[in-house]
Amino acid sequence: LSKLSLVAFDADDTLWHNLIHFEKTETAFGQMFADYMPAEKATKVLTEMEKKNIGLYGFGVKGFTLSMIESAITITKDQLTSDQVQRILELGRAMLDHDMELLPHVEETLKATSREFKCLLITKGDLHHQERKVLASGLAPFFEGIEIVSDKKRATYEKICKRYGGAPETTLMAGNSIRSDVLPMIEAGGYGCYVPFSILWDHEHEEVPKGTPRYFEVEDLRGVLDVARKIIA
Ligand SMILES: [Mg+2]
């Protein structure tokens, strides 16, 4: 058995932009209700609502849109108009319908990596929206499999590895989230590679498991192939 049977990639903010669309919309939402309270405060109401609802709605734009409506009801003290609801729906639609923007080095990295390793894409979010993003990205041919999941837990990775004839012990997962891409894969016995999203490494929000065996971090996506080669060397 090879030391590495699968190389898996996260998609949102690893292969393409995602967070900027949420942040842009959160700001626009706050501005929309600036007559009721300071825009920043309205945005805060929304981000708290998102957190409250995530367990029930899961990750994705549609649940986020419902949270915008619910926040607006709170902010306007039950005076929300159908015109305002319409504008919120438009904000949500725009998030589902924006142009695909690949992050730097994505195509070259996937092209090279898929020549040497069996590659998977593992992403969470709305099934329909993620399917459309995969299609729009043009990246599907590089992947042996595309897995759209509701959450990324240790068991999720175990199941997926098995499905593709591998095992966590011989799988490398690369992504921008320590919490969902890196740690559960390492817990399952696999390799995790942190690919920070922003230029400034945002180590404050998530604990980087320095010193953990099977943990790697790279400066950008190109480093993932080097890590994979290092593992089999
Ligand atoms: Mg991500």
Image: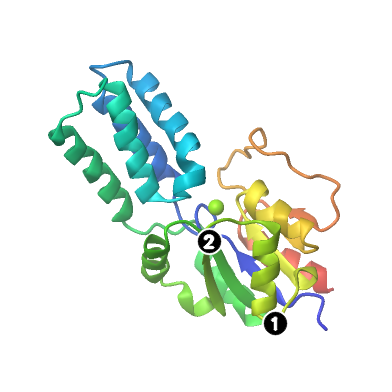
Q: In which quadrant of the rendered image does the N terminus lie?
A: bottom right
- In the displayed structure, would residue 21 be above or below residue 214? above
Residue contact at pointers 1 and 2, CB within 8 angstroms:
no
Front residue (pair 110, 33): 33
Q: Amino acid at mark 2?
A: Thr
Q: Quadrant of residue 201?
A: top right
Q: Give the percent coordinates (x, y) of residue 21.
A: 38, 45
Residue 41's x, y, as percent?
Answer: 39, 19
Q: Is residue 77 above or below residue 57?
A: above
Q: Residue at x 57, y 56 (%)?
A: 151
76 or 220: nearer the viewer: 76
Q: Is residue 145 above or below residue 231?
A: below
Q: Is residue 120 visible in this depiction of the protein?
A: yes
Task: List x then y, in percent, for residue 217.
Answer: 72, 52
Q: Residue at x 48, y 56 (%)?
A: 103
Q: Secondary structure at mark 1?
A: loop
Task: Tell me where residue 143 sits by quadrant.
Answer: bottom right
Quadrant in which the C terminus is drawn: bottom right
Q: Image check: 156 left or right of 212?
A: left
Mark sitting on residue 165? 1
Residue 151 versus residue 202 in the image, above or below = below
Q: Residues within 10 Å of mark 1 (few under 14, many from 20)?
A: few
Visual colour scheme: rainbow
Q: Earlier in the sequence, mark 1 or mark 2?
A: 2
Does the image show residue 224?
Answer: no
Q: Residue at x 57, y 42 (%)?
A: 199
- Density class for disc 2 (Cα within 10 Å; few <14, some 14-19, many ≥20) is many
Observer-nearest of 55 and 165:
55
Furthest toward the left, the residue is: 83
User: Hey, what amino acid is under mark 1?
Assistant: Gly
Dot 2 corresponds to which residue?
A: 123
Ligand 1 within 8 Å of disc 2? The answer is yes
